[in-house]
Amino acid sequence: MEPILEDAPRSFDFSVGENQKMVAQMARDFAEKHIRPHAMEWDEAQYFPIELFKQLGELGMMGVLVPEEYGGSGFGYAEYVAVIVEVAKVCGAIGLSVAAHNSLCTGHMLAFANDGQKQRWLPKLATAEWIGAWGLTEANTGSDALGMNTTAVLDGDHYVVNGSKNWITHGKSGNVAVVMVRTGKKGDSHGISALVIEKGTPGFTHGKKENKLGMRASETTELIFDNCRVPKENLLGKEGEGFMQAMQVLDGGRISIAALSLGIAKGAFDAAVTYAKQRRQFGQPISNFQGISFKLADMATEIEASELLIMQAADLKNRHQPVTKQSAMAKYFASEVAVRTATEAVQIFGGYGYTKDFPVEKYYRDAKLCTIGEGTSEIQKIVISREVLR
Ligand SMILES: Cc1cc2nc3c(=O)[nH]c(=O)nc-3n(C[C@H](O)[C@H](O)[C@H](O)COP(=O)(O)OP(=O)(O)OC[C@H]3O[C@@H](n4cnc5c(N)ncnc54)[C@H](O)[C@@H]3O)c2cc1C
């Protein structure tokens, strides 16, 4: 009988590369200096700090995977994961926006644009001169993306786009969006195409900004298309390839949401350990109680397991190997761990964890997005089980 999982344990190289260390240090320093002092204020005000993303762009963190010839940093997935983790340790919302810009909009163009299209858009995105958005989800079709209603009909040299997209990160502030549109029959996986639509194109506006539970400094809005004429040359790849492209983009994107989850879990864990050592009850630090120290043991174990799944997926992606199952596993596991870790961190802080004076309530709110965005946990289990049952 053919083994379903690997029949022998795999060996891994656990060394951390010099670039990875350098990038992690740079992202950590930046996050401590420019994000931590403002994170709660931005969260409360639901303020999207666009100027911060320009600074991140100057440091190469908005085009981590983009080759240097297109103005990016030219790094691989290990360095990309390091950036997202370090930013998310301090603020999940900024981590989400960095991830959506890098892997969704920019990542889609990187994988499927022709050279002329890359020359046109990637240098602006990689330096954050432009902020990118990516539109797949609609009001009635989230998990079931094939049911989308937004259409694009060819009229001479233009596609005429009508419909709307919901829950789009950077839907208002984004300068350009990769938008999945229906060019064929509803429900047909070959009936979807990917168009690049620039802000300012007549008929392209944004709708309401969502008032969210967490990730509040990451902007989420609706995109609206009303007879929006998009030049034919803005089509990525061929007509009908958009759904397949989107699924491949999500394979990479899920590694970044797993990294986002890992960063949030690490931030919540660090806060919980520090607090458990300081807080005294019954004449001793609460970390002396097994009820607390065992929570920390579970949190630490799950965080390290997340990290291993993420690095496995990152390694496969760097080597251009199939990664669908491993990125879904990393995203599913790491996001659920982030929620469990943040929940236990609030518990360890007791009543103080329930206030905005300490950071753990924000980790708790931010973490929940990770089990929903870029495919819910249930959808990840569908992806994983499909691969296992192949
Ligand atoms: C903050 C935020 C940012 C986002 N950014 C973007 C973005 O930039 N671009 C973009 O395109 N989208 C974005 N999204 C949308 C996100 O990807 C969707 O919300 C997500 O895919 C789930 O879709 P839905 O909300 O319509 O839920 P639904 O698909 O309606 O799911 C509702 C529930 O039913 C479950 N369910 C659905 N189908 C099945 C099934 N077959 N079996 C078992 N359970 C099932 C789901 O797991 C979930 O629990 C964002 C969402 C949020 C909250």
Image: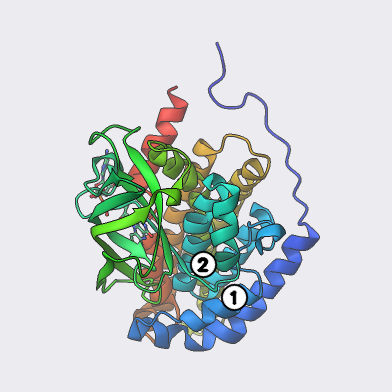
Q: Quadrant of the N terminus?
A: top right
The residue carrying mark 1 is: 56
Helix, strand or loop at disc 2? helix
Q: Is residue 275 above or below residue 185?
A: below
Way the structure is coloured: rainbow
The three-letter amino acid code for the residue at tag 2 is Val
Q: Residue 288: image x %, image y %? A: 55, 73
Q: Are marks 1 and 2 in contact (CB under 8 Å)?
A: yes
Q: Is residue 352 above or below residue 375?
A: below
Residue drawn at 41 percent across, 29 percent down = 386
Q: Residues within 10 Å of mark 2 (few under 14, many from 20)?
A: many
Q: Is mark 1 within 8 Å of ligand 1?
A: no
Of 323 and 285, which appears nearest the observer? 323
Q: Is residue 138 left or right of residue 331?
A: left
Q: Residue 344: image x %, image y %? A: 42, 66
Q: Quadrant of the C terminus?
A: top left
Of 84 and 48, which appears nearest the observer? 48
Q: Residue 2: image x %, image y %? A: 56, 14
Q: Residues within 10 Å of mark 1 (few under 14, many from 20)?
A: many
The three-letter amino acid code for the residue at tag 1 is Leu
Q: Which mark is residue 98?
A: 2
Figure quadrant of residue 147: top left
**Residue sitting farthest toward the front:** 156
**Residue sitting farthest toward the left:** 140
